[in-house]
Image (tube, coloured by chain):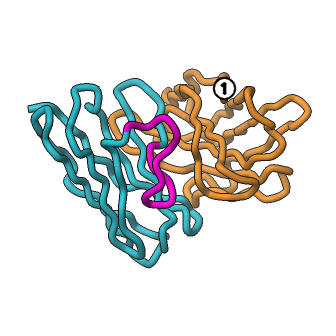
C-alpha cells in the first residue's frame, strides 16, 4: 500500500497568513493526488485534483503543487472560513490512501 | 447538482449485519464509479471500497475483504454496502462518494454520511 505522510498534523495561524501543508508519498504517484477540506461535522470537499487543478468554485487563495512523491498545499491568505481539517489522498493505486490530516486553527 | 444521501446506519451488535444505501441524483449515476469511505470517531479518512460504473469491478481495503460487499442498482440510482460480521473497529461514519470517472480511484462529491455503531 502507498503510505501518505502529511505534515504538520496541526497548525495554528493568523488571518491573512500564508499556510503550507506538505504530503509525501511512499512511492512515485505522478500527479495522482487530491486535496480535501473537511469542516467539523461535514463531509469532505474536494478542493484540488491532479495535484494542482483547482476545482470549480474553489477560491483562488487555495493552490497545490508537486509531483512524484512530494506535494504541497497552500492557502495564500488565511480566512476565518478556512478553519477545517485538510487531507491529501493518492489515487495512483489501490487501495486509495489518505494522509492523516492537518487540523488548521486560527491563532 | 450532485446529491448523495446515505441511509441504513444505526447501532448493531458485534457479529451482526447491516446494509447501507446511498441514493444518488443530479448526475448520470450509471456513468461513474462509486466509493465508500469511512471515518471512525475523531479519526481520519479510510477508503473502504470502490465499484465500477457497470458494477463488474469491485475492490476493497484488506480489513473488510470477505465481510463487506459493495453493489449498485443503476436502474434505481442507488449504491449499497452490505456489511457482515461487524466488529467494534467498524464503528464509523460511512460516506458514499462519486468518482470523477468510469472506473477511477478519485472521489469528488461526497454524501453527508451514515453513522454505524457496533456495540453490545
A90, above or below A18, in the image = below
* Position of residue B90 measured from the top left corner of the image (x, y, whole percent): 51, 40
Residue position for label 1: B1
On the picture, is B23 further left or further right than A107?
A: right
SS at circle 1: loop
Residue A48 colored magenta?
Answer: yes
Q: Colour of chain B?
A: orange
Residue in the picture at 79% in, 43% down: B71
Q: Position of residue A72 (x, y in %)?
A: 30, 60
- Does residue A4 sit above or below A11 in this rendering? below
Q: Quadrant of residue A17?
A: top left
Q: Chain of mark 1?
A: B
Seen as rendered, the residue at the extreme right is B75
Closer to the camera in the image, B55 or B60? B55
**Magenta stretch contains residue B65:** no
Dominant secondary-structure state across the stretch colored magenta: loop
How many numbered badges does the structure rendering display?
A: 1
- What x and y, as percent, mark residue A66? 36, 68
- Mark 1 nearby-residue class (10 Å; few <14, some 14–19, many ≥20): few
Q: Position of residue A3 (x, y in %)?
A: 40, 67
The tint of chain A in the picture is cyan
Amino acid at each position: 500500500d502507498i503510505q501518505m505522510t502529511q505534515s504538520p498534523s496541526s497548525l495554528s495561524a493568523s488571518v491573512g497568513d500564508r499556510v503550507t501543508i506538505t504530503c509525501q508519498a511512499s512511492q512515485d504517484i505522478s500527479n495522482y493526488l487530491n486535496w480535501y477540506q473537511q469542516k467539523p461535522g461535514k463531509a469532505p470537499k474536494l478542493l484540488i485534483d491532479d495535484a494542482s487543478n483547482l476545482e470549480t468554485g474553489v477560491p483562488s487563495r487555495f493552490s497545490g503543487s508537486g509531483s512524484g512523491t512530494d506535494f504541497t498545499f497552500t492557502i495564500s491568505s488565511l480566512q476565518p472560513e478556512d478553519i477545517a481539517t485538510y487531507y491529501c489522498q493518492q489515487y495512483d493505486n489501490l487501495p486509495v490512501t489518505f494522509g492523516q490530516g492537518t487540523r488548521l486553527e486560527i491563532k | 447538482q450532485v446529491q448523495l444521501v446515505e441511509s441504513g446506519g444505526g447501532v448493531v451488535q458485534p457479529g451482526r449485519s447491516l446494509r447501507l444505501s446511498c441514493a444518488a441524483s443530479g448526475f448520470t449515476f450509471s456513468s461513474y464509479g462509486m466509493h465508500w469511505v469511512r471515518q471512525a470517531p475523531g479519526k481520519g479518512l479510510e477508503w473502504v471500497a470502490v465499484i465500477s460504473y457497470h458494477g463488474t469491478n469491485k475492490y476493497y481495503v484488506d480489513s473488510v475483504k470477505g465481510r463487506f460487499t459493495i453493489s449498485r442498482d443503476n436502474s434505481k440510482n442507488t449504491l449499497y454496502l452490505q456489511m457482515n460480521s461487524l466488529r467494534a473497529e467498524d464503528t464509523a461514519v460511512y460516506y458514499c462518494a462519486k468518482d470523477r470517472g468510469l472506473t477511477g480511484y478519485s472521489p469528488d462529491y461526497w454524501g453527508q454520511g451514515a453513522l454505524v455503531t457496533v456495540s453490545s
